[in-house]
Amino acid sequence: MSSNNNTSNTLAILQLQSAFRYANLTVGFILLIGGVLGNILNIIVFIKGGNYKNNACSLYMFVRTFLDLYVLLTGLTTRIPATGFQIDFSLMNRIWCKTRLGLTDINMTSTYTLICLQAIDAFICSSPSAIVRQKSNIRIARYLVVGTLCFWSIHEIPYFMFQDLVISGGTPVCTGTNAIFNQYRSYVTYLSFITIIPVIVVSIFGYLTVRHMKTIGVTRSLSSFTRQKISMALFQIFALIAFNGPYGFWVFYTISTANLVKDTYRRAVEQSISSLANTYNFGTYASSICCYCISKRFRKQLVVSLKELICGIHTNQVYPNTQRTGTRTQLPTQVDN
């Protein structure tokens, strides 16, 4: 009887792992292909438009596009073979084991920081006070971007020191060799910096921004360009909550139940869900093109850029030297309502 139960449990575990493996591959390939193409299009549109040179929110979006593209190419590209085909390159190369996740984490934490800065900037730009709106400054934004990249690069230095490829039970394992630092990464980096803090910050400032936008006087005092940038930032906030929320819940659950005794089937279920949650979380880095296309101006610029690339059709646009005080936002001759 015990033998039959073990056989049925083993069969159930294999079926469960097979189902989650196909789900991982499907979600992974959709996010990878859509995310890479979307971020490349974002880069083309931002370079063609040039608004990132004069607008703080556009600068955060522009820099984030490169960070998101790196995370997808190095993080998700290697994760798909590991979860779908059991081909883990970090178990084959010591240098890749020590550098892959550290470099990816630098870009991930920088992305979440820029999303928070983007949410704060949207709140500032939507303020009823003209004095507050002038605080959205491109010069300060440049300092914040450089500071963000430098801070998280320094923050990840211990990872390159403690992460290593070791032999455990006769099999290679890419893991941290310092127990204290491993706990710090679990409780502080992943649970706080990547999960709780970004969700709280963007939720608070997103709510405050929506309240500002409901004020008729404030909405009328903002330019079309500023209103659309705020809308793009708000949709990015919704995307962050949608993709990062389930991942954050699962991280919290994993840490909370780490010391519990679990049977084989429960461990298999949790490992399968954890793998899918980690893959699904990459949607944060692949969804920006959908969030930005909410802007009519962005969609038009995207179409123009694609025509120039594919058909060689060049559209000449004249941009007068019209700037808003403090924000230094250049407005095109054609204003979208």
Image (cartoon, helix red, strand yellow):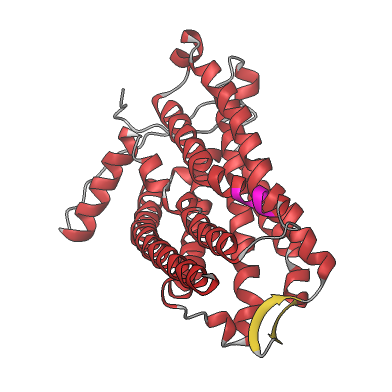
Of residues 84 and 2, the one drawn nearer to the viewer in this rendering: 2
**In x, y percent, where is residue 94?**
64, 86
Question: Residue 34's quadrant in the figure?
Answer: bottom left
Residue drawn at the location 69% of the way across and 75% of the way down = 175
Q: In screen coordinates, is 125 left or right of 33?
A: right
Of residues 4 and 335, the one drawn nearer to the viewer in this rendering: 4
Of residues 280 and 140, the one drawn nearer to the viewer in this rendering: 280
**In x, y percent, where is residue 300?**
26, 40
The residue most toward the front is: 1
Q: In screen coordinates, is 40 left or right of 57?
A: left
Q: In screen coordinates, is 152 left or right of 12?
A: right
Q: In screen coordinates, is 158 left or right of 328?
A: right
Question: Residue 12's quadrant in the figure?
Answer: bottom left
Can the viewer see residue 114? yes
Residue drawn at the location 76% of the way across and 58% of the way down = 259
**In x, y percent, where is residue 23?**
38, 60
Membership of 251 in magenta stretch: yes
* Image: 158 above or below 212: below
Of residues 272 and 296, the one drawn nearer to the viewer in this rendering: 272
Tell me the chief SS of the magenta region: helix
**In x, y percent, where is residue 11?**
43, 70
Question: Residue 335's quadrant in the figure?
Answer: top left
Residues drawn in magenta: 250-254
Quadrant housing the C terminus: top left
Can the viewer see residue 322? no
